[in-house]
Each structure stands twice: as structure tokens, then as C-alpha cells.
Image (cartoon, rainbow, N blue to C red):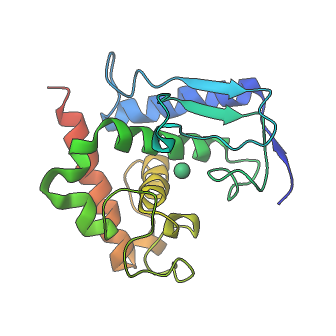
Amino acid sequence: MGKICTSFDEVTRGYNKVRGELIVLGVLWNGSKLDGVECYYEALNPIGLIGWMGFYNFNDRNIHFPAVYNGLALDFRWYDKNSALDVMRHEFGHALSDRYPGALKKGGVFRTAFGGPCCDKPAPGTNPEDWEERCVTPYAATKTQEDFAETFMLFVKHKGKIPVKFAKKPAIRKKWKAVAEIVKHVAAAKR
Ligand SMILES: [Zn+2]
């Protein structure tokens, strides 16, 4: 794919819209950990490499959205120009797993569905080339943390209702249910 440009307004609209979706799901509320996640528009970022900083182990735990992204950008390489919103949902997935690690571990829900801990490696014993029956996108198969972010992206986009083409695949259905459970755990922190 070629170079893709985003505008400040597009990213701002996306940030606000996705925050609204997360409020409806119950995982974002006034003063909550996800409420504290900021989004920076990187006008001068030349390669568009940065998405969610948390998993790079830097201290910055916010979303960095490059003005220009291209084939080098890890979290952005799979998307087309109409999907700034999906990128935003994906990055909030990283934000949630990074800021609520306890919600993922509770009852072993993450590990059971995603085949390993939430980390920068694919699930043990899986081949990233062979993804279609068990992951929502090819990128999801590269690392368990990306598998979560991609599944979360679609969960948010579809307001928790699984599309039929994914419901037919038991491994994906299991991950979708795990995301629903994790969302419930996070929402419970409000009370
Ligand atoms: Zn990612």
C-alpha cells in the first residue's frame, strides 16, 4: 500500500467518537484510566512508526497518531485510508490491556482464549501464516497483544455483536467472548 495521510481534524473526530463508543461499553468514564489516555497527532513523525507506546516499555502511555503512515508502520500497515477510526479502536485496545492487566488475567480468560499471555510474540505453537480460522486479521496472528487489539477493534466497532463470518469460527468466537468478559471486568471497576 502507498502512503496514507491523516488530518488533525480526522484524528480528533476519531478520538472523540471512539471515546464515545467506549463510554457506551462501560470501559471509559469520567476520571477512569482510559479517560486519561491522550492522543497526540504527530505532524512531524516522518515514518509513522508509533501507535501505542505502552508496549514498547517507554513511560509514555498515550496514543501517538502519525500524520503520515506507510508500510513501515506496524500498527498502521494493514489499514486503508478510510480506517483511522479502526486504528483508534485498535490503539485503545492496547491502552486497555496495558492499563488493566488484572482484567486480562482474571480467571485466566485472556490466556485461555488467546493461547498465551498478552505479549509481543505469537501464541506458542501457532503459525502466523495460518491465521484465517483463528484470527480476525493477519496482523492479529503476529503477536498475542495484537490479536487482542484487533479483536477489540472489531468488538468496539460492532458494539459487542459478533459478525456472522466470525461467529462461524470457534476460536474467534472464544476470543470475542473473552473480550466481552474483559470489558465486563473493566466496567466493574467503576462501581
Ligand atoms: Zn497494535
Residue 184: tell me if it is visible.
no
Quadrant for the N terminus in the image: bottom right
Task: Residue 43: name its quadrant.
Answer: top right
Tell which residue pokes out farthest to the right in this image.
Answer: 2
Q: Which of these two is toward me, 77 or 173?
A: 77
Numbered label tally:
0
Q: Where's residue 61, x and y in %?
A: 47, 30
The C terminus - image quarter? top left
The residue shown at (67%, 47%) is 83
Query: In the image, residue 64 lies at what x, y percent?
Result: 62, 32
Using the image as rendered, state which of residue 67 and residue 123 is in the foreground: 123
Instruction: Locate residue 190 relative to residue 63 in the image: left or right.
Output: left
Q: Is residue 185 left or right of residue 20?
A: left
x, y percent for residue 29: 33, 22
Q: Hey, which residue is sitting farthest top in the picture?
A: 31
Q: Is residue 113 above or below residue 131?
A: above
Question: Could one spot residue 185 in this view of the protein?
Answer: yes
* 93 or 48: nearer the viewer: 48
Q: Is residue 177 above or below residue 19?
A: below
Location of residue 32 in the rendering, given as x and y in whole percent from the top left corner = 31, 22
Left/right of residue 113 with respect to residue 68 in the rendered view: left
Which residue is at a point 70% across and 50% down the rendered structure image?
73
In this rendering, would 47 be left or right of 32?
Answer: right
* Residue at 77% from the left image edge and 35% from the top image edge: 6
What residue is shown at x 37% (from left), y 40% (from top)? 98
